[in-house]
Every structure is written in structure tokens, then in C-alpha cells.
Image: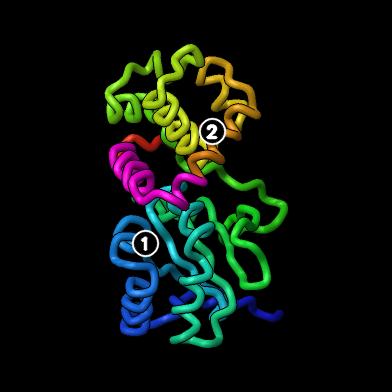
Amino acid sequence: MTKKHAAVTAPALDEQVWKKAMDDLRVKVGEDNFNNWLVQLRQEASTDDKVAVLSTATPFLVTWVTDHYAQKILDVLRAEVPGIQEVKITLRRPVGKKEVVSTRSFKPSTTARTNMLLAGRGARTPPQKPERVPISKIQQAVAERYDISTCHLKSRDFRQAKVVKARRIAMYIAKAEGYSLAEIGAAFDKFSNGAVHEAVQRIKNAIRQTWNVQHEIHALLNDLSAQRLPEK
């Protein structure tokens, strides 16, 4: 009988090369962007030397880093190891868990918005849901940060600019955490899917244009990091 050998897993880069790539990435994106979004990147084991598997701390950062920085990460890695063809950004394993629960993959031939993949699983196995912060906790953290009540935040009847901005940010974070438009709308005074989608898009646009919004969302993520709960 032919023996089956387990796949060899190893980081795509040694530590010195990894450090050089991250130093180059810091210069490429700027100190502020690196410290806010990329400083928590870590190398993970890979079964394919053409694929660099990296991890970060939250589902939001998996999405954010893939959508905004995957090409730049691939560029600096390929400058050190030309054979790397793909970057996978994973959610770092919580203490005591054996599996990475979600992965987003980026190749130069595809857009950064590729489908969610499950690391180490066959196609027939349904993906596990990543750990998420409850929407109520997101609402509470945003309301506290902007010094408004959660009732005002959730209600469509309060339309002051400060409240509207806070509501949109809360919806954006909830969407990045993996909640559906319907789930978010139900938590915000029955907002329609279209209204939630518009709010999320407005924050996406603001993030691209305004450093302050990036900073505010990053601060909120830090506040929420300890409140992440596993999906049942």
C-alpha cells in the first residue's frame, strides 16, 4: 500500500525576509496606515510555497486589509520571494482553537473582493462562522464614543448630523463583522436593506477620503476587541 504523507506546512518566508518585507510595506503605505491596519499581521504556516498565508486579529481587519492592502502586501513579498503568487489573509486563531475560521484570498488576476474561503477544508464542508461582536455591543460602543444615546442611534427619527454619522459607522462595522443587511436593519429600527447598504457605502467612501474616519473606526475596533463572541 502507498503511504499518504501529510502536507508539509511552513511559512513562505524566513523571519529576516519577513521583517524586511514588513519594513518595506511600512514605507510603502506610510507609518499611520501601517500602525492602524497592518501592524497585527503575522505569518502563518502554508502548504504551498507559492501562497503566503498571513493572519490578523479581527474579521473586520481580514476584510479591510484584503480590500485595501492585499496588492501592496503581495508586491513587497514578491520583491523578496518572486515565486509567491497569492496572499491569503486569515482570522488569527483564538487561544485554544485549532483552526483558522475564515480566509480571504488575493491574486493579481482577481479583485481583492474574492469569496470567503475556509483554510484547510474541502469544498463540500460548510464554512464556520467567524466570531462576531454582537450588534448591541457595537451600538453601545458607538453611542458612547459619540456621546449620544443608543435609542437615538437606532431610531430613524433622529437625523442630526452627529447621530447620522454615528449610525452609519455602527452599520458599517456590523457589516464588516459579517452581519447581513437584514440583520443590521432589524437592529436599527427596521431600516431597509437599501438604507443599510447606502449607509455602509457612505462610510466606505468617507474612509477613502478622510483620515479622521479611519482613525475613529480603528479606535472603535480597539474598544470592541474584547467583546467578540463565538457564533453558535
From the top left corner, tell me how far across and down residue 2 is, in percent. Answer: 69, 81
Instruction: Locate residue 128: give its quadrant.
Output: top right
Q: Is residue 70 left or right of residue 121?
A: left
Residue type, numbered disc 2: Ala
Residue type, numbered disc 1: Leu
Q: Kindly tell me whether residue 111 is visible in this rendering.
A: yes
**What residue does disc 1 label?**
38
**What residue does disc 2 label?**
199
Q: Is residue 166 left or right of residue 187?
A: left
From the top left corner, tell me how far across and down residue 104 is, in percent. Answer: 56, 58
Front one among 122 and 174: 174
Q: How busy is the neighbourhood of tag 1: few (under 14 within 10 Å), some, or many (20 plus)? A: many
Circles 1 and 2, Cβ within 8 Å, touching? The answer is no
The CA span between labels 1 and 2 is 25 Å
Q: What residue is at 49 percent from the left and 59 percent from the top?
A: 68
Q: What residue is at 37 percent from the left and 57 percent from the top?
A: 37
Front one among 138 and 167: 167
Say the numbered circle drawn on residue 219: none
Q: What residue is at 59 percent from the left and 61 percent from the top?
A: 112
* Chain-order first, disc 1 or disc 2: 1
Q: Is residue 176 above or below residue 188?
A: below
Residue 180 sits inside the magenta stretch: no
Q: Secondary structure at mark 1?
A: helix
The magenta stretch spans which residues?
205-224
Looking at the rendering, in which quadrant would you find the N terminus?
A: bottom right
